[in-house]
Amino acid sequence: MAADGLITMRSSHGPKDTVNRLEAQVSAKGMTVFARIDHAAGATEAGLPLRPTDLLIFGNAKAGTPLMQAEQAIGIDLPLKMLVWQDASGATWLSYNDPTWLAKRHGLAGGSEAAAKAMAAALDGIARAAAGSA
């Protein structure tokens, strides 16, 4: 079941390789990596099982700030994030919020909508490169 506004693609690499490739792609595009969260490690510390699940939080003030200037509440969805996770069959996936969906969610239009479309195209390229689909 696909969640509204969520883009998910299969990776041809394992979870750790995918998140490492993702981080390298984000950095190569001049974005700032704010955090890398290993949810599985946190689950292990709590005594709970969880397949590999890593969240990368990243962004670029030049891209995100204009959206927040247009509608400050979009800051709840920024900075951007991508989740790398492994399903029960061992397949690795990469999921992220579609910036054009975020723009609609927050009622952005005009130039802000165009900025969200450009952001979506950039994220698609980053995700495909990390997943090995491009």
Image (tube, helix red, strand yellow):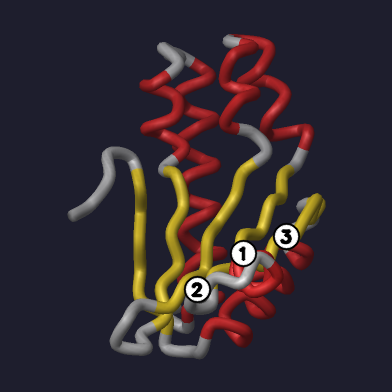
Q: Residue at x 53, y 20 (%)?
A: 112
Q: Earlier in the sequence, mark 2 or mark 3?
A: 3
Would you name the residue on which mark 3 appears? 29
Q: Residue at x 35, y 77 (%)?
A: 87
- Secondary structure of the residue carrying tag 3 is loop
Residue 64, position as x, y percentages in the image: 68, 30
Q: Nearer the viewer, residue 118 or 88?
A: 88
Q: Earlier in the sequence, mark 2 or mark 1?
A: 1
- Secondary structure of the residue carrying tag 1 is helix
Q: Which three-letter amino acid code belongs to the residue tagged 3?
A: Lys
Location of the C terminus by quadrant is bottom left
Can you say whether 111 is above or below 30 in the image?
A: above
Instruction: Tell me the CA gap for discs 1 and 3.
Output: 25 Å
Give the quarter of the image for residue 106.
top left
Residue 44 is at least partly visible in this image: yes
Can you say whether 22 is above or below 108 in the image?
A: below
| Disc nearest the viewer among 1 and 3 | 1
Would you name the residue on which mark 2 appears? 50
Q: Are marks 2 and 1 in contact (CB under 8 Å)?
A: yes
Q: Residue at x 42, y 80 (%)?
A: 92
Q: Nearer the viewer, residue 13 or 126?
A: 13
Residue 33, position as x, y percentages in the image: 79, 55
Q: Residue at x 72, y 44 (%)?
A: 59
Residue 55, position as x, y percentages in the image: 61, 60
